[in-house]
Image: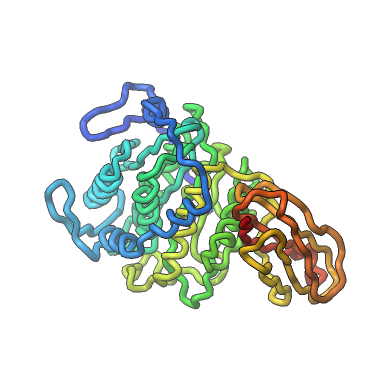
Amino acid sequence: MHRSLTVIFFVLMKLIFADTGNSLLPQGQSPIQSSIDASVNRNAVPFTDSLIQSLIQQTNLDTLIGTVNILSGEDSVTINDSTYLLLSRNAEHPHNDLAADFIFQTLNRYGLPTFNQNYNPTGRNVYSIQTGTDYPEQIFIICAHYDDRPDEPAPGADDNASGTAVVLEAARILSQIPTPCTIIYALWDEEEIGLVGSTHFAQQAFQSGEDIQGVINLDMLGWDENDDGLFDIHTRPIANSVELANLTVFLHNYYNIGLTPIIYSEGTYSSDHASFWHQGYSAIFLIEALRGGDFNPFYHTSDDRIANFNLNYFYALSKLAIATISYLSFNNIPVNLENTTNAIASDFILEQNYPNPFNPTTTIEFVLPRSDIVTLQIFNILGEEIETLISEKLPAGKHKYHWDASRMPSGVYLYRLSVESLNGGGEAFIETRKMIFTR
């Protein structure tokens, strides 16, 4: 992660060249649109809750660990028929190109059109494009930087082999199914010296008029010393960035990932998502507790190794990232979740609805420690509001509400409870859970 508060922009005058081995795209042609404009398969898989759940379950911790070990020099790897132990991912070290070669061959192995974007003598982005079946012009990006700090030794396991591994894992899983929207799996170079690679890509995408709907940037996902599951989601009121952050929390709660997300609406500019903010695109940044007081003390040192990872935490964050990019590729950002937050109030008790599964009615029960303004809403699986059961000030104590779903189709529904001003301080409490209606 690049921590400078000033983003350094390099004005690069040459056009993008995308190298898929030996061939170059015609001068001036966008590699993104070139791939998207190719033959499009219209046989999309419709979104289902079970599909997203199955994609999450395919996340493989051994694969993630294996990728981190290769990129951080713990394990050797065969690249272009030769075996190497990667000693550095510094942009000026020859092994950084080997790391890029490893990323390229991994993405290429998944059957995706894969490109090198050589934007200066030392800088090289690597990315793959999975063309959408129904809305190929609508693009979502899951990304991370693969380079490491300039001085050696710095294995860079957490910063940022961790994020790189998750992007590659997302490509492995999602490349096996068609998605309605286009996904780009992108690994940036030279983040550590000023977000150079992502800046170049974002500028070129903007100049080409690419319709980038959202960017999920992953940087440092392995450190959780106190095992509290706390992690940051950084966003800003730029395009739909806030809605994208809210959706990520929504999916975290819905799929019971088991961590503690905190949204920072005045998010840091110190990683590659900022390159997209500067072009007016929606983007969020997922990172361990940078502002939550549990940041990796081995950051930019020779001890940034996978031996110091909290593997359960790394695994859970990986699943959340894959859940989010999966959902987006099928559904785009549901704007009616814009007020979802994750402030925590330990004295507010939300009981489970019962029975669950239910037919045709269910009871939702919660306890208020004091009188407060409460809203209880029902959503379908697409995030569309079905009904508001209550929205008023309630007295302290236990409350029960019944929902009659007899007019609704069978399926998965969500209920969201929000409390306006716990403890008199204007702090919101919002929690979302799922329930199943069966006829």
Say how many tags the image has.
0
Which residue is located at x 78 percent, y 59 percent? 375
Residue 325 location (% of width, % of height) = 48, 48
- Quadrant placement of the C terminus: bottom right
Residue 57 location (% of width, % of height) = 42, 60
Q: Is residue 65 left or right of residue 142?
A: left
Name the residue at the left extreme: 82
Q: Is residue 219 above or below residue 33?
A: below
Q: Is residue 211 above or below residue 67?
A: above
Which residue is located at x 55 percent, y 43 percent? 331
- Quadrant placement of the N terminus: bottom left
Which residue is located at x 39 percent, y 70 percent? 311
Q: Is residue 174 left or right of residue 428?
A: left
Is 249 in front, or is 117? 249
Is 95 in front, or is 84? 84
Which residue is located at x 39 percent, y 59 percent? 59
Q: Is residue 26 above or below residue 358?
A: above
Can the viewer see residue 186 in this picture? no
Q: Is residue 332 left or right of residue 36?
A: right
Q: Is residue 422 above or below residue 1?
A: below
Residue 357 location (% of width, % of height) = 61, 63
